[in-house]
Image (cartoon, grey):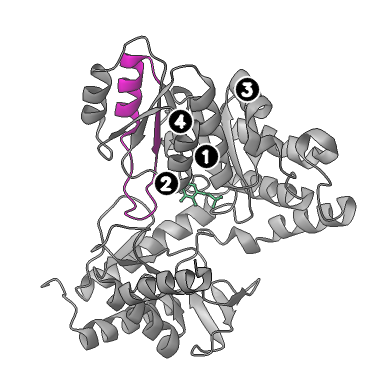
Amino acid sequence: MNFEQFFEDRLRALKDEGNYRVFADIERKRGSFPVAACHNPDAPEEVAVWCSNDYLGMGQHPKVLEAMHDALDSCGAGAGGTRNISGTNHHHVLLERELADLHGKEAALIFTSGYVSNWATLSTLAGRIPGCIVMSDALNHASMIEGVRHSRCEKHIFKHNDPEDLARRLAVLDPDAPKLIAFESVYSMDGDIAPIKEICDVADEFGAMTYLDEVHAVGLYGPRGGGIAEREGLMDRLTVIEGTLGKAYGVLGGYIAASTALCDFVRSFASGFIFTTALPPAVAAGACASIRHLKESDVERRGQQACVAEVRRRLRLIGITTLENDSHIVPVMVKDPVKCKWISDWLMANHGIYVQPINYPTVPKGTERLRLTPSPVHSPADIDRLVRALSEIWSQCQLARAVA
Ligand SMILES: *Cc1c(COP(=O)(O)O)cnc(C)c1O
């Protein structure tokens, strides 16, 4: 086989569909978020980032940076080993305590990313509980899907955010089989929110465990940033709460919070936890500082919510429809992969506005979009520039506008 030819042909097909991924080569500027230097040949030297998952700008927060500098200077660069073999640094232990407290659980366990935490935890739980059946929301993240697949357990997909469909599917299964329901709180692409209480009610009815991915909610919702389950007073009804330290907390890493026995079980059996080097101590210290800060401070959350509301309002005024939802995610639907990429390139080249196009397979074909993530670091002037640029390109492309 001509391997090179094969790779090139497949890439050509991706490009023809408009689904080839091109990374923007940027350097975020601490102190000036959302501004980043841009190294793309066709772009201005500075751009405003409108698609970051550093939702609150915590990646440049002085407390986070100070904690990271301190830990770097006192502990050095890397952890020096896996958690089991010399790699458990006191900063990891402190971080796990902070996370257990955040979610009102007995324990927490950190991983090198949110992806790994989902993959490792689900594959371990579903793979090691004999006869375990997983019920998975139709729009679950790739990391959960891969984890469940790796476990080789029986799996059923229920309709997105539909507790009744879930109950119907559970009702025909062996009542004695152990079951786990895996879902998310805020779905990252449409920004819609799960009916957590209703899903927990169904779980109780059928004696199932519940596994909630709060990756797009931790730091952002609830009085202490514990997520949607905290906001709704439901944290104690979830068997496992999973989250990331790389989005609203602005650093890197993933975790689960659950009972002592469950965390110890995953710690003891999950290959993705055991056989990999622990996070650098400075990363753990930075994440810990970020969580602590957002437990006390509401300023960032309120700033974000105000910016989200303003962007939605301004886009509505000029007839650009965004997908309605109750979260901080503002999807502007383009519904065509080539157009979506083209608009994104145009915004970057002509206005220094960086919004990555979101195409298949991240979203279904025909639902291509620009996913805006307004934050407390976007100023009214940033919003003005964004809205004016979108208005201009909507006219140029003759894209549909709602009649006001
Ligand atoms: C980003 C994401 C993850 C993975 O988290 P990382 O820390 O980025 O690896 C998990 N679940 C969902 C829903 C995500 O969007």
Q: Which of marks 3 and 4 is nearer the N terminus?
A: 4
Q: Earlier in the sequence, mark 4 or mark 1?
A: 1
Callout 3 touching callout 4 (CB < 8 Å): no
Residue kind at label 1, given as amino acid type? Asn
Q: Does the magenta stretch include residue 63?
A: no
Q: Name the residue under label 3.
A: 265
Dot 2 alpha-carbon crowd within 10 angstroms: few under 14, some 14 to 19, many 20 or more = some
Q: Mark 1 points at which residue?
A: 118
In the image, farthest residue toward the top: 176
Determine whether 142 is above or below 402 in the image: above
Q: Earlier in the sequence, mark 3 or mark 1?
A: 1
Q: Nearer the viewer, mark 3 or mark 4?
A: 4
In the image: residue 5, left or right of residue 17: right
Residue kind at label 3, given as amino acid type? Phe
The answer for how far apart the CA atoms under marks 4 and 1 are is 15 Å
- In the rendered image, the quadrant that contains the C terminus is bottom left
Mark 2 lies on a secondary structure that is loop
Question: Viewer-proximal residue, 318 or 281?
Answer: 281
The answer for how far apart the CA atoms under marks 4 and 2 are is 18 Å
Q: Which residue is drawn at 46% across and 55% down?
A: 302
Q: Name the residue under label 4.
A: 152
Residue kind at label 2, given as amino acid type? His
In the image: residue 171, left or right of residue 6: left
Q: Nearer the viewer, mark 4 or mark 1?
A: 4
Q: Which of marks 4 and 2 is nearer the N terminus?
A: 2
Question: Viewer-proximal residue, 190 or 3?
Answer: 3
